[in-house]
Structure formats: structure tokens, C-alpha cells
Image: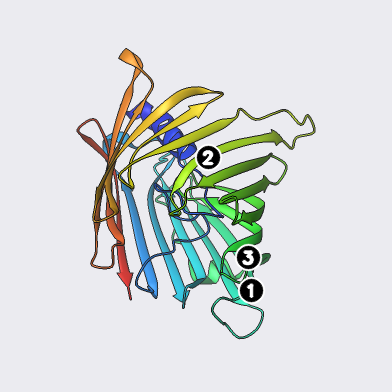
Amino acid sequence: MRRLLPLLLLTTLTTAHAAYCFQHPRTDLTLYPRLSGAPRQIEEQVTVEPAFRTLDFITARTSNYTYQGTQAIQVTHRLTPDDPSFPRTTLFQATIRPSGALASPATTLAGSWRFVIRGSLTGPAPQVTAADLAAEKALPISITLDAQGRLTQYKGVVLNPEAGLMDEVQVSCTYASAQRTVREVVSLARRTRSVTDAQFGPAGELLSLSSTGITLDGSNSPLIPTAETFTYDNGTLSRSVFSVAGQANSTFAYTLTSGQITGYTVQIGEGDNAVRERHTFTRDTHGNWITHEYRLGKALVATVTRRITY
């Protein structure tokens, strides 16, 4: 099972759309979570069970999100991989500030990000301090929001905290209210440019996603197209199917309580090669999830816990 984890996490990451411009049912917004109840701070910890730890993915993570109103003004990730050959600690921090007085919604924000990694070949992973981070060069972030507080442009960096991967990124979001569509264009520096079209229903429910793209390595090779369709029973999300190059790849079945997702199951593949996952959530009185358990069959793979300060 240990060797399965990179495949499973990679599959989970690729079927969970990187959502900058709209909320996907299975994921938070990529830049930072937007929760109910006007939280002031979110502390998030991720732990992967020992039987599933590998050198390829981060097995312990602590993230902090600090808010002013609805806007996140600081995001911090501390990452530790399970790699005895090179114990290391990574610290990432982004700081976001409005260009003028913070209004609701703000329309122009600017900030910076820093990143530092410290490792040791002879002992445990060294601690990384705020002073270490402050010594690193700050690089710029810019965010533009529309009159409804929705993202229209982002230029900066994106960190995949599960894999410890970081990319410079540019994002644009186009909203067509009459057609109930959103177009999201994401360019990862020197890697890929993807275009995702999201179709919504009259009640704002997500109906479908379709994504295409090209590589940015000079060859302009097309990316494999993906799509996801969502099914609702009496207005409640019940099922979705994720497809790769027109072929169904994964099927999701959702459990909801009072309109909130409390769990979903995933079947990836068919027959003897099928992989089955289960995700379960507990939520606080504001409806925000505070624990997320990820299981492969009956085996617990990883747990995410959140402490939310309102």
C-alpha cells in the first residue's frame, strides 16, 4: 500500500480542480479558503499515517490563514517530508495587502511571498524560523477583484502543499452572468497553460467543467482534455463523473446533511484495477469543516484538522 500513495494522492490532486475563479464542491479555493462566519484565523494540520508515508509527498503540514474581513492577508505553510536521507523543513509565506484602505470588496491588492528550505544530511530536520524567512528575497503578488469581490486577475505563486511543489502562476477569470459560465485561464511559468470552462445552473449549482491546454516548453503540445459532470437529485448534489480524453476515469458519490457535504466516495478505474477511496468531514456550527479523513478502503491514509477562530 505504501507504494500506492503517490498514485492515489496524484489522482486525488488531478481530479480536484485547482479552483481560483469558482468554488469546486470538493476543494477550497486555491489561493485561500473562503469560509462562513467571517473567520479571523484558520490553523490547519495534515498528518499522513506511517503506513502510507513516502519520500514523494509531504507527510506533515501546518498551515495558517489570517483574515481581515473576507480577505486573507497572510498565508503560511510549514512542510516536512518523510525523507530520512535528507530531513528538511520548508517554510512558505505570502502577505497580501490592499493598495488603499481595505473596503468590502477591495478591488486591488498587492503583496509578496517568501520561501525558505533547510535540510541536514547528518541529523533531524532543522527548525526554520521567521528570521530565516525574512532573510529571503520577497517576490511580488498582485490580485484584482471585481465589484462583487470575485477574482479577475492573479499574478504570483501557487504552492501545492501536499506535494511541496511551487510554481509562478498567472490567472485570469471571466464571468458571463447571462450564460452562467466562468472561464478560468491558468498559466504556470514555463510549464502549462490551461483553460477551464465552468457551467452553472439557475440556482448557482455547478453543472460541468471542461479543461484543455498546451505546454509552454516551446513545443506547444496539447494537454490531455478533462471534464467533469455533476448530477443533482431534487437540487442536492449526488454524483459526479470525471473524464480524461472523453473516457470516464473516476466516479464520485456525495453524502450531504443540511446542504453541506459530509462525505464522498471515489471509485477510480474499473474491475480488479479499481481503487476506492472515502472522504469524511465533520463541521462546526458555522458549517465549515474542521476534520477531513481520507481512507483507502478501511485504512486511514491521512487526517486534516482545522482550528478556526472567529
Amino acid type, label 3 = Glu
- Comparing 291 with 50, the one in front is 291
Given this view, does label 1 or label 2 mark the residue nearer the observer? 2
For this orientation, the residue located farthest to the left is 298
Q: Is mark 1 on a helix, strand or loop?
A: loop
**37 left or right, relative to 28:** left
Q: Nearer the viewer, residue 281 or 81?
A: 281
The quadrant in which the C terminus is found is bottom left
Which residue has dot 2 on it?
209
Regarding mark 3 in the picture, which secondary structure is present there? loop
* Amino acid at the residue labelled 1: Thr
Q: Residue at x 31, y 49 (%)?
A: 47
Residue 188, given in percent of the width and then of the height, sits at: 66, 46
Residue 248, image x and y in percent?
45, 24
> Where residue 293 appears, x then y in whole percent?
26, 46
Q: Eyeballing the image, is 204 above or below 217?
A: below
N-term-proximal mark, 3 vs 2? 3
Among numbered discs 1 and 2, the one appearing first in the sequence: 1
